[in-house]
Amino acid sequence: MSRRDPHIAPGTVEGEVRGVDLRGIFTGVIIGFLAYLWLAVTISIAILGLAFVGLLPRAADTAAAAGKRVGASFGWGLLIGVAGPLIGILVLATVLGLPLGFTMLSGLNVLAPLGYVAACLIFGRWFVKGTSNRARVGAFFAGFGILLRLIALIPGVGTDRVVRGVHLTASER
């Protein structure tokens, strides 16, 4: 605060005063969040895939071999990826089933990223052949980069949940 009167330069402001474009701000925030989410999933799955291929090479080969049985992979993936959460939610509706329902849903949170990694290996084996560790890593990144992360960018088609749910059980076989 000052004891003096304010000195304001003479002038005028022309034009209209418009409201704040909240829709545009909200759209920008949503787009930024989705870009961040896409980047976070990409980095997380890349690290998980490298750990899976590097630490469990025989499991990676088994997952890629299981992917050759397309009908079984789709069937088990849909059963676990769609029916699993529905059954978990139904079990949560009962008081006695709360621990089992939470355990089922938590288990799906672990299986979904592993299924995504298995799907990357399955798709990548179409492009990269070989049994060395370098071939496994190459196959993982071929499937990861070319198919799955590009598909994930397509609105409505490339949701990560769909890809994870379809190939969920390839890592279990």
Image (cartoon, grey):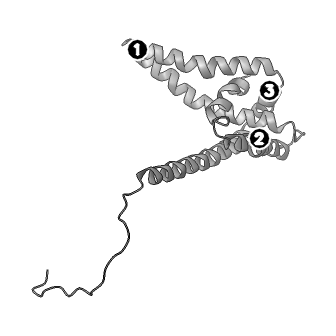
Disc 2 target residue: 147
Image position of 70 with respect to 59: above or below: above
Mark 3 and mark 2: span between their CA atoms?
15 Å
Q: Tell me if label 3 and label 2 are in contact, CB under 8 Å.
A: no
Residue 147, image x and y in percent?
77, 41
Q: Residue at x 63, y 49 (%)?
A: 43
Mark 1 / mark 3, whichever is N-terminal: 3
Mark 3 / mark 2, whichever is N-terminal: 3
> Callout 3 environment at 10 Å: few (<14), some (14 to 19), or many (20+)?
many
Observer-side mark, 1 or 3, equals: 1
Residue 123, image x and y in percent?
80, 35
Mark 2 and mark 1: span between their CA atoms?
38 Å
The picture quadrant where one finds residue 136 is: top right
Residue 143, image x and y in percent?
78, 40
Observer-side mark, 2 or 1, equals: 2
Q: Residue at x 72, y 44 (%)?
A: 150
Mark carried by residue 93 = 1
> Furthest residue to the left?
3
Disc 3 target residue: 67
Observer-side mark, 3 or 2, equals: 2
Q: Residue at x 62, y 23 (%)?
A: 81
Q: Tell me if label 1 and label 3 are in contact, CB under 8 Å.
A: no
Q: Tell me if label 2 and label 1 are in contact, CB under 8 Å.
A: no
Image position of 169 with respect to 14: above or below: above
Please name the amino acid that badge 3 sits on.
Answer: Gly
Q: Residue at x 52, y 49 (%)?
A: 33
Where's the N terminus, which quadrant?
A: bottom left
Q: Secondary structure at mark 2?
A: helix
Mark 1 and mark 3: span between their CA atoms?
35 Å
On screen, residue 84 versus residue 66, left or right, reads: left
Please name the amino acid that badge 1 sits on.
Answer: Ala
